[in-house]
Image: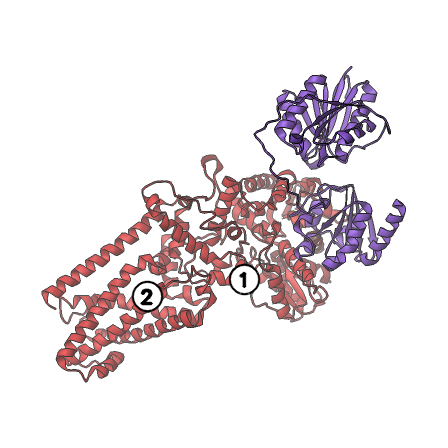
């Protein structure tokens, strides 16, 4: 029976949603082909949590748990994963195209002298071969690719595939791997995160952005409340950052961060091109603005004409109610 | 004079001349060692005439600072007269009573002239001294400590001393020879009355002292010149002779096929003319005074760029002359990233420079070196470059959407029409930016109303490449330029119409480097023509008090000042005012030189300064003729929260609203 090996990414001991998405997708492929889904969990102190991968559809979990594996290290992670791939004789290897996945997948492909299709947004099997769909030229065209080589490797774009607990409550075996030599030329001394525990706009699925219309740093609390109710990150336009209301790391736009969340809510921002260039890839755009002639009002999927100081608190309240 | 005196004099002269020649030769060799560039020997007679006229009439120093310039002119003419007078002065050590002009009326007139010039020059020297050391104007005394140097005090002391010793020597001479030239030499005569009480022997000694002091100061000055900014006496006029005959700020093409190193990372990569500029700089600070980056508290001063590069190249002189590698790169000791990336390429520095230095090409060469050799540049530029590479626009919006702004309008596309009088190059802002699209809509309305035969390229159009070129990403720029030229050549048209001054400059003045010679008009030129021909008629002012903001690339780069004003006048009902900086002295919006795509996080904001100038004259409407200016000034107005009082509109929009 063939095996699909999945890299289940974790950060700071917590498995990422992107990893669950890949395991879920592997399960789907396995349902068609009858393959075995094996998840590889690499990290430190993650044994207790690893079981959850089974709920997303892994038949077996290979655990590499060691203090030295606490932080991502391209060399040791690659060695561990390649060992797992060789031991299981897996014929399909799947990653998530996160920052880590984009780094690790090509290394594994090179080490195993095989082929990789990265950042795929569609995946399927025909005659035992992976068929993937990946965007080129900033999404202008799509390439349908049949992967040759053994094993076949693909990385999947985050937030495209659903993470589904198809086997809720199921217990699967967690097997500790035999670890290779974990000494490395690379030594992670310290991990510094800017903005503390704050959700980074470039990774968030939902972003609530405030613009010049927010009228001052003190009014950003209503934006933050809305963001909290949605589990969203708070973004800002260049005008708000320039005015010193928000830190530069929150800036979305041409000269800030380029984002493509599932939901982008703009409060009091006109949608000038420099901002649009940074968020036009969002799947759903909601604009709240007094000025119905603001350029964003035509471009947004949903436009709410109204004073953000009235609209946003009502939205927050309704979302809280809904969530309860 | 006795034999010993004559020998001492000859030794002094030979020593000073040898020293002077050695130092000049060093600088000449440093210029010659510079990388090859255009040789600029074309039209030598015209060049010579221009240099002589500009220097001789002192237009160079008077044009932007009339009072200081006039004082400078006194000193300048003092130098000219005294260069000749010194020949007389020295020859008399060997041939008493020698005069270049004999002893007739002309000689008398000559001495009258020298006498007057001596006084005017003294006044000039005192004026300059007081100005520099009492009033301490910022352009010449800042930034600290680079601009603090005793050079000027020494030189002014020399000049003043030369005049005083001359007059005293002449005065003493009058008494000793008993010849009265009182009528012809009134000021020397005045000194003779001061000296009249002295005994003849002591007067003879004093006369010799004045004579020697004068000649030694002349020689001392000669020795001092090459080491100081006073090298501009020699280098300045030569630099004006070799001035660029292209529009200011036009950049040179890099031949990628035959070049290994791009731009400047080491000082030995500068072209000869760049180095000539460094040695010509007078440290006068006029460039600094008009620089928008400096005015908004950025670390850039064009003056400092020149001074610092001059210091750097002299510091490396031994290495350069002996053909060794330079000991250190230009960045970050002699120039910092914050300096070179602050430039908006507005050209105000080049416009005002009395010795016609070319600051922008030097700064862009440094950017090119950082961009293409070192891969160091402001990270905000990266998305813009990626956008140009993948979608031919700096915002990376889908290239298939380039013509979407025409939806619902009757705008012909070249690919369907094949031929038109005007090929309208809409540009990225006009195609993608909402504020730019509004301008495009207005232009389309005007062209249709006037029945102009035109067509746009639509999705075949690509960015003109200006932001890439100004940021030093020459390779990316050349891709854009070559592709655009190839597209243009597929169609039949008479002229290219641009709605952005940056596109205008690129296509008109920089695309010829890629075998694309086209006649280009800016939309304000065409609209002015249509108004004049009566093809469009305008109603009167509905926009209150109006002012026009000159775009650097339209005005200073291409001398288009009148067309936009004609249009605004035609609909302003006499309510058109000029801001404190206008026409060739206009103040940049802050968006040029790829600054549009960078953060402005240091100092104050250039667009705010400009908006404040519009506020000062009570303007209710700022007319612009450039989409970058539109974005910068409109943002400035909104950031200052005065959008209720001032509106920013492109001239095309104003016209489109007032067509009757």
Q: Colour of chain B?
A: red
Indicate the chain coloured purple by its letter.
Answer: A
- Give the class, few, some or many, for how many residues have Cα within 10 Å of label 1's Cα (few <14, many ≥20): some
Q: Is residue B530 left or right of residue B407?
A: left
Q: Position of residue B167 (x, y in %)?
A: 25, 75
Q: Position of residue B258 (x, y in %)?
A: 45, 35
Q: Quadrant of residue A90?
A: top right
Same chain assignment for discs 1 and 2: yes
Question: Which badge, 1 or 2, comes first in the chain's sequence?
Answer: 2
- Give the class, few, some or many, for how many residues have Cα within 10 Å of label 2's Cα (few <14, many ≥20): few
Q: Position of residue B539 (x, y in %)?
A: 71, 66
What chain letter is assigned to the residue under label 2?
A: B
Q: Is residue B133 left or right of residue A20?
A: left
Using the image, determine if residue B638 lies above or below residue B575: above
Q: Quadrant of residue B627?
A: bottom right
Using the image, determine if residue B135 lies above or below residue B534: below
Helix, strand or loop at label 1? It is helix
Q: Position of residue A69 (x, y in %)?
A: 66, 30
Helix, strand or loop at label 2? It is helix
What chain letter is assigned to the residue under label 1?
A: B
Residue B569 — which label? none
Q: Is residue A15 left or right of residue B619?
A: right
Residue B154 — which label? 2
Q: CA distance from mark 1 to mark 2?
A: 30 Å
Q: Quadrant of the C terminus of chain B?
A: bottom right
């Amino acid at each position: 029976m063939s095996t699909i090996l999945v890299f289940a990414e974790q950060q700071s001991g917590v498995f990422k949603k992107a990893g669950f998405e890949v395991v879920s997708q592997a399960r789907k492929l396995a349902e068609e082909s009858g393959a075995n889904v094996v998840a590889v969990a690499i990290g430190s102190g993650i044994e207790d949590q690893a079981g959850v991968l089974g709920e997303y559809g892994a038949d077996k979990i290979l655990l590499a748990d060691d203090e030295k594996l606490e932080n991502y290290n391209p060399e040791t992670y690659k060695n561990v994963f390649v060992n797992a791939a060789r031991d299981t004789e897996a014929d399909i290897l799947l990653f998530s195209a996160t920052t880590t996945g984009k780094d690790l997948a090509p290394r594994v492909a090179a080490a195993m002298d095989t082929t990789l299709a990265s950042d795929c947004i569609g995946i399927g099997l025909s005659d035992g071969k992976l068929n993937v769909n990946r965007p080129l030229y900033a999404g202008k065209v799509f390439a349908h690719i049949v992967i040759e080589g053994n094993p076949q490797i693909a990385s999947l774009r985050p937030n495209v595939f659903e993470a589904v607990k198809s086997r809720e409550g199921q217990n699967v075996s967690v097997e500790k791997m035999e670890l290779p030599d974990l000494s490395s030329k690379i030594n992670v001394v310290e991990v510094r995160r800017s903005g503390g525990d704050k959700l980074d706009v470039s990774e968030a699925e939902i972003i609530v952005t405030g613009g010049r219309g927010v009228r001052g740093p003190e009014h950003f609390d209503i934006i933050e409340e809305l963001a909290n109710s949605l589990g969203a990150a708070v973004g800002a336009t260049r005008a708000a950052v320039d005015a010193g209301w928000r830190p530069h790391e929150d800036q979305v736009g041409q000269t800030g961060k380029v984002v493509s969340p599932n939901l982008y809510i703009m409060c009091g921002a006109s949608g000038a091109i420099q901002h649009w260039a940074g968020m036009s890839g969002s799947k759903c755009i909601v604009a709240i603005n007094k000025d119905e002639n603001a350029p964003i009002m035509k471009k947004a999927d949903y436009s709410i004409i109204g004073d953000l100081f009235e609209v946003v608190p009502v939205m927050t309240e309704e979302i809280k109610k809904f969530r309860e | 004079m006795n034999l010993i005196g004559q020998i001492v004099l000859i030794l002094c002269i030979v020593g000073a001349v040898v020293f002077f020649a050695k130092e000049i030769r060093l600088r000449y060799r440093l210029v010659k060692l510079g990388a090859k560039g255009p040789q600029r020997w074309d039209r030598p007679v015209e060049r010579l005439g221009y240099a002589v006229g500009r220097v001789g009439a002192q237009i160079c120093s008077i044009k932007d600072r009339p009072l200081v310039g006039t004082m400078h002119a006194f000193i300048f003419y003092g130098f000219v007269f005294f260069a000749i007078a010194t020949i007389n002065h020295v020859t008399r050590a060997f041939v008493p009573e020698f005069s270049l002009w004999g002893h007739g009326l002309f000689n008398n007139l000559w001495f009258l002239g020298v006498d007057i010039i001596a006084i005017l020059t003294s006044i000039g020297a005192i004026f300059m001294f007081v100005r520099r050391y009492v009033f301490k104007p910022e352009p010449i005394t800042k930034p600290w400590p680079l601009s603090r140097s005793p050079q000027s005090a020494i030189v002014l002391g020399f000049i003043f001393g030369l005049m005083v010793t001359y007059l005293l020597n002449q005065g003493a001479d009058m008494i000793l020879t008993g010849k009265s030239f009182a009528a012809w030499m009134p000021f020397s005569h005045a000194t003779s009355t001061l000296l009249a009480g002295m005994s003849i022997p002591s007067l003879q000694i004093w006369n010799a002292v004045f004579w020697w002091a004068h000649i030694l100061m002349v020689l001392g000055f000669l020795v001092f010149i090459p080491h100081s900014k006073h090298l501009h006496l020699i280098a300045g006029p030569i630099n004006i002779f070799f001035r660029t005959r292209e529009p200011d700020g036009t950049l040179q093409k890099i031949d990628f096929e035959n070049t290994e190193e791009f731009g400047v990372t080491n000082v030995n990569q500068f072209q000869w003319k760049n180095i000539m500029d460094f040695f010509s700089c007078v440290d006068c600070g006029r460039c600094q005074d008009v620089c928008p980056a400096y005015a908004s508290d950025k670390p850039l001063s064009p003056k400092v760029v020149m001074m610092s590069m001059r210091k750097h190249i002299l510091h490396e002189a031994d290495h350069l002359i002996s053909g060794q590698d330079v000991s250190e790169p230009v960045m970050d000791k002699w120039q910092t990233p914050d300096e070179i990336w602050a430039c908006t390429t507005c050209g105000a520095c080049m416009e005002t420079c009395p010795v016609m230095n070319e600051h922008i090409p030097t700064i862009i060469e440094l950017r090119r070196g950082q961009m293409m050799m070192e891969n160091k540049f402001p990270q905000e530029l990266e998305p813009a470059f990626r956008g140009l590479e993948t979608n031919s626009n700096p915002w990376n919006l889908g290239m298939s959407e380039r013509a979407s702004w025409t939806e619902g309008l009757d705008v012909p596309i070249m690919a369907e029409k094949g031929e038109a009088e005007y090929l309208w190059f809409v540009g990225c802002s006009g195609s993608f930016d909402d504020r730019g699209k509004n301008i495009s809509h207005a232009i389309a309305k005007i062209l249709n109303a006037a029945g102009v035969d035109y067509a746009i390229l639509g999705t075949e159009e690509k960015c003109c490449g200006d932001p890439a070129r100004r940021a030093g990403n020459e390779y990316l720029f050349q891709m854009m330029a070559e592709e655009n030229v190839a597209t243009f050549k597929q169609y039949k048209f008479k002229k290219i119409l641009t709605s952005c001054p940056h596109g205008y400059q690129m296509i008109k003045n920089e695309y010829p480097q890629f075998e694309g010679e086209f006649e280009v008009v800016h939309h304000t030129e065409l609209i002015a023509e249509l108004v004049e021909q009566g093809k469009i008629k305008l109603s009167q002012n509905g926009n209150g008090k109006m002012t026009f903001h000159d775009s650097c690339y339209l005005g200073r780069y291409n001398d288009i000042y009148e067309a936009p004003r004609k249009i605004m006048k035609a609909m302003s009902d006499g309510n058109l005012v000029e801001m404190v900086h206008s026409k060739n002295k206009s103040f940049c919006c802050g968006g040029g030189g790829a600054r549009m795509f960078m953060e402005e996080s240091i100092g104050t904001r250039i667009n705010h300064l400009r908006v404040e100038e519009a506020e000062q004259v009570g303007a209710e409407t700022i007319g612009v003729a450039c989409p970058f200016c539109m974005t910068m000034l409109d943002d400035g107005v909104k950031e200052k929260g005065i959008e209720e009082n001032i509106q920013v509109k492109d001239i095309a929009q104003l016209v489109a609203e007032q067509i009757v």
